[in-house]
Image: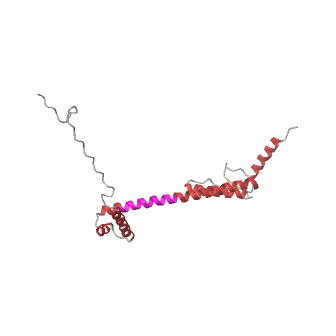
C-alpha cells in the first residue's frame, strides 16, 4: 500500500494557507501625534544649534531617528519651496507674455521702435524665468532702433516690405 504524501497536489487534504504578513506602519507603530511632536522638537533643536546626539537623548530616541526626522523635514520643506517657486515663475512668465502681446499690438499700430525694445526685454525676462539664454540684442543704427537678429525686421526693412507689397497690388498698365 502506497502512502500519499501530504504535500502532493493530488492529495484531497486541504493545504493550510500562509497567513499574510502584517504590513509595517511607516512610523513603526508610533502615533501621528508623537511623530509630529518629535519633528517639532527635533527641528527646534536644530534651529538652536543642538547636536543630533543631544536632541536624540532629550527625546529618548536613537540618533539615526533624529537624522531621519531632519531629512524628512528637509525633503518636505524643499518640495513646498519648489512648488511655490514654480507657481511664482508661472505667474511672472504669464505677465511677461501679456507685456509682449501688448507691445506687439502697439508696435503694429504705431511702428515705434521703443515698443520692440520693451518686447525684447520681456522676452529676456521670460528666458531668465525658464533659465535659458536670452537672444542677444543687437544695436542696428544710431537712431536707437533695436531688434533681435533674424527675429524682428528694422523699421527700414518694414517700410521696404510695405512698399513692395503696395507695388505688387497696383494694377499694371
Q: Find the residue positioned furthest to the right.
A: 173
Q: Find the residue positioned furthest to the bottom.
A: 48
- Residue extent of the magenta highlight: 69-85
In-image side of 30 versus 84 (left or right): left
89 falls in the magenta region: no
Image height of 72 relative to 6, above or below: below
Which corner quadrant holds the N terminus? top left
Which corner quadrant holds the C terminus? top right
Image height of 3 relative to 134, above or below: above
**Percent x, y for residue 100?**
66, 55
**Residue 88 sits in which quadrant?**
bottom right
State how the image is colored: secondary structure
Give the camera-side residue of 46 and 29.
29
Q: Find the residue positioned furthest to the left.
A: 1
In-image side of 12 versus 86 (left or right): left
Give the camera-side residue of 126 and 66.
66
**Residue 124 sits in which quadrant?**
bottom right
**Percent x, y for residue 36?**
37, 64
Q: How many marks?
A: 0
Image height of 12 relative to 65, above or below: above
**Percent x, y for residue 104?**
69, 54
The secondary structure that dominates the magenta segment is helix
**Residue 136 sits in which quadrant?**
bottom right
The residue located at (68%, 56%) in the rendering is 102
The residue located at (81%, 41%) in the rendering is 169
**Percent x, y for residue 41?**
36, 68
82 falls in the magenta region: yes
In-image side of 11 versus 114 (left or right): left
Amino acid at each position: 500500500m502506497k502512502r500519499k504524501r501530504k504535500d502532493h497536489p493530488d492529495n484531497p487534504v486541504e493545504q493550510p494557507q500562509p497567513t499574510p504578513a502584517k504590513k509595517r506602519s511607516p512610523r513603526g507603530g508610533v502615533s501621528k501625534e508623537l511623530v509630529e511632536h518629535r519633528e517639532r522638537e527635533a527641528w527646534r533643536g536644530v534651529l538652536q544649534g543642538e547636536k543630533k546626539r543631544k536632541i536624540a537623548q532629550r527625546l529618548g530616541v536613537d540618533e539615526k531617528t533624529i537624522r531621519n526626522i531632519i531629512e524628512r523635514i528637509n525633503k518636505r520643506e524643499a518640495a513646498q519651496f519648489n512648488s511655490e517657486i514654480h507657481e511664482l515663475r508661472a505667474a511672472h512668465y504669464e505677465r511677461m507674455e501679456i507685456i509682449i502681446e501688448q507691445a506687439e499690438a502697439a508696435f503694429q499700430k504705431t511702428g515705434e521702435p521703443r515698443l520692440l525694445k520693451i518686447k525684447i526685454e520681456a522676452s529676456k525676462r521670460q528666458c531668465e524665468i525658464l533659465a535659458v539664454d536670452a537672444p542677444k540684442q543687437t544695436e542696428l543704427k544710431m537712431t536707437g532702433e533695436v531688434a533681435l537678429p533674424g527675429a524682428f525686421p528694422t523699421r527700414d526693412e518694414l517700410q521696404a516690405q510695405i512698399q513692395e507689397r503696395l507695388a505688387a497690388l497696383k494694377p499694371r498698365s
